Structure formats: C-alpha cells, structure tokens
Amino acid sequence: MANVNPFPALRPVPERAAEVAAVPYDVVSTEEARALAAGNPWSFLHVSRPEIDLPEGTDPHSPEVYRKAVENFEHLSRQCPLTREREPSLYTYRLTMDGHTQIGIAGAFSVDEYDSDRIRKHERTRRDKEDDRTRHMVALRAQTGPVFLTYRDRGEIDELVDGAVGERPLYDFRAQDGVQHTIWRLDQRLSRRVAQEFENVPLLYIADGHHRAASASRAREEFRDRSDRAGGAAEYDFFLGVAFPARQVRILPYNRLVQDLGGRSSDEFLFTLKRRLPVLVDAPATPGRRGEVSMYLGGHWYGLRLSSGDPGAALDVTLLQDSVFAPLLGVRDIRTDKRIEFVGGIRGTSALERAVDEGRSAVAFSLYPVAVDDLMRIADANEIMPPKSTWFEPKLRDGLLIHEI
C-alpha cells in the first residue's frame, strides 16, 4: 500500500515558471550552476546552489551558504513571486524529450514508508551529501526538489492521469535543454481518487533522488526533536516526489572514463584484455544488447563480450568491474578511486571520444543501459547497485512545486 498525499504547494506564478525551474542541484558543479543562473534572478539555482551568489572559493557547506539559501528563498518568494495553494492538491507532471513522454503523479510521500523500506532503494547514500541536503531542508523548512519514484504499472491510475491531462495545464514550457515540462493541478475529487488508487500499489521504488529522500527522513527527526506536537501527522512526515509507471521510465547508461591503463601501453593493455575476454575490432560505439560493452582506446572502438545477456545475470557494470577494472586497471573501489570519471549517457559517446583523444583519459567504456526491471529486482532483494549504474533522463526540475515542512 503506497500513500501519496495532496499538499498545498508553494510555486511560481505561471508566467515565471520557465525562469524559476532549475536542473537538479546535484547534476551541476558550482561553476556550471553559476553559468546557468547568470542573468536570471529567478533561477531556483540561487536557492538550491546559493554558493553561486557568494565569493568564488566559498565552501559550499559553510553556514553562510545555508543562510544565503534562506535569504534567496525569501527574496524569490516575495519578488518573483511564489504563490501558495489554498487547498492541498496532487499534480500530474509530464516530461517530453526527443519523442519520449512520461507522466507521473506529484505529491507528498510517506517518510514512514521510506524508513520501513516500503519505498525501496537501490543505492547507498553518502553521509556528507545527506548532511548538505538535510541542512538545506531544515534551514528553508521546505523540500524544493522532488524524488523521482517509479512503480509497477496500474491501468486504473493511467486512466485517471489520462483524464487529467486533457485539462488546461498550470505550466507548459520548453526548457533550454529541449525538455517540455507540463504540470496540471488536480481538483479535490480527482486528487482523492488518485490517492485511493495508489493504496493498491504495493511498493514504490526510488529511481533518482536517494539523497533527497534520506535527507527528508533525517530532517524529520530534527523537527521532531524540536516539536512538542502530540500526535497527528505533520508535513515533515512526508517528502516531495513524482511517481511514474515503470514502463514509461527511460534509463540511459552511465559510462566510464579511466585516466590511465595501470602502467601498460595501449597495445599491452589490449593484448592482456584479449586473453581474458572476447574482443571485437571496429565495434559500434554503442553496445547493442546487455552483456556487451564498447571500449574506446587509441582512436578505435572495440566490443567486449562480458556475458550471455541473461536478464538474471549480474549487471554489466559489475561484470566490467570484476573482469577489467579490478584485475587489469587496478581499480578496486570505484567509489573512491580518483582515476575514474563517470559520464551520463545524455552526453553521448562523442564526449568519451573527446576525453581520450585529448589525452584527459586513457580509455573509455560505453555501456548498455540497465533495465527498470533490474532496478526493481535488485531493490526487492534488498541489494545495492554499484555506484553510477543508472542515468535517468529526462529529469524533473527544482522549484516548480515546493513542499513546505
């Protein structure tokens, strides 16, 4: 049983929505965030990455950064302005990119269900990243970016969503990256019906946003310690999320670059690799199926066969680690090894080629994307995916629907 609750969203007025909407805080560096927000005082990056408005070199986790977040949030609320819904509502959020469309339900999801693993995870979180978003949520008393959730499809929910998207949307704009963002606010009757149908969804799964969800749980504990509330649910008992049916979710690969070849020349590395794995010369840059990886080395693409592609087998990222990274490149822990760089599939294989051709990396690996069924299978088994296994695209935007806690 999944609980999704209507909430009174704080949100930009429609004419400012496109200017406010910002990429997730954790997909850009400080420098990239500063460039994206330049000349746009309404960009939510001023709130989610407030160090961009402080002197260069400012520690992004210093107290002054969180104070700046509060200052910028209050300024945005007054001057943009942001408006607060009079009544709690659910929303439908549609993403359209390159002919792909997915429509999810935006609402407030249960922290209790997250803590009890009825909202399932497939990644470990880092304490320092949790610390950052927890401090951000507590300082603002708000969750400003949604957790991306998925669930096994239910036709009854699809029917309700289909009915909702025929109405006039609250927001409908194309972002600079070409993604169309369209949001509808559901009326009270439809919000109740959707919430009732979600009670028949046995489990939810975090696709993207593990640190946001973990931070919401930690923020709740802090607010509970401060509160003298006697019973009843508070807004901090829920976290902001958007839940999409699994069949609509699109996962792109998370590719890898390695700075050196473990002391070998390109020829030596290739010779050693061929003794361990089947290697195809002049392979395509994008592998065609599970169990295959494409490798860019010395100006050429090679194809590596890791497994038969059995859906029940280990993930390609695990097989690559065990058969190439650890034994041949000396990469024992991809979480901590500074020689590895991860490149989201949205950047394409040309980004891999440039890194190697320009000498910034010695070798690149292009992977086949993980399936949503794999994600749910691993989460159901209470197992963890290797770091940087999935890249979800298109991404939700911060600042469009804010959940005050």
Image (spheres, grey):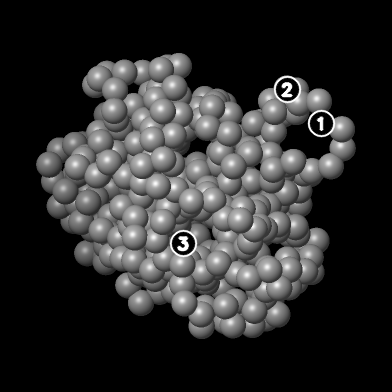
Residue 124 vs residue 65, the one in the foreground = 65
**Alpha carbon separation for disc pair 2 and 1:** 9 Å
Q: As shown in the figure, which amino acid type bears the numbered disc 3?
A: Ile
Which x, y percent locates residue 343?
A: 33, 47
Q: Quadrant of residue 173?
A: bottom left
Task: Name the residue tied to disc 2.
Answer: 226
Q: Earlier in the sequence, mark 3 or mark 1?
A: 1
**Alpha carbon separation for disc pair 3 and 2:** 40 Å
Q: Residue at x 44, y 48 (%)?
A: 82
Q: As shown in the figure, which amino acid type bears the numbered disc 2?
A: Arg
Task: Give the numbered dot on residue 229.
Answer: 1
Q: How many marks?
A: 3
Mark in the foreground, 3 or 2 = 2
Mark in the foreground, 3 or 1 = 1
Q: As shown in the figure, which amino acid type bears the numbered disc 1?
A: Arg
Q: Secondary structure at mark 3?
A: strand
284 horizontally vs 242: left or right? left
Report crowding for label 3: few under 14, some 14 to 19, many 20 or more residues within 10 A (C-alpha). Answer: many
Which x, y percent locates residue 282?
A: 22, 64
Q: Residue at x 48, y 51 (%)?
A: 83
**Alpha carbon separation for disc pair 3 and 1:** 42 Å
Task: Name the residue tied to disc 3.
Answer: 251
Residue farthest to the right, as pictured: 231
Q: Quadrant of residue 302?
A: bottom left
Which x, y percent locates residue 154?
A: 69, 76
Q: Secondary structure at mark 1?
A: loop
Q: Residue at x 47, y 32 (%)?
A: 335
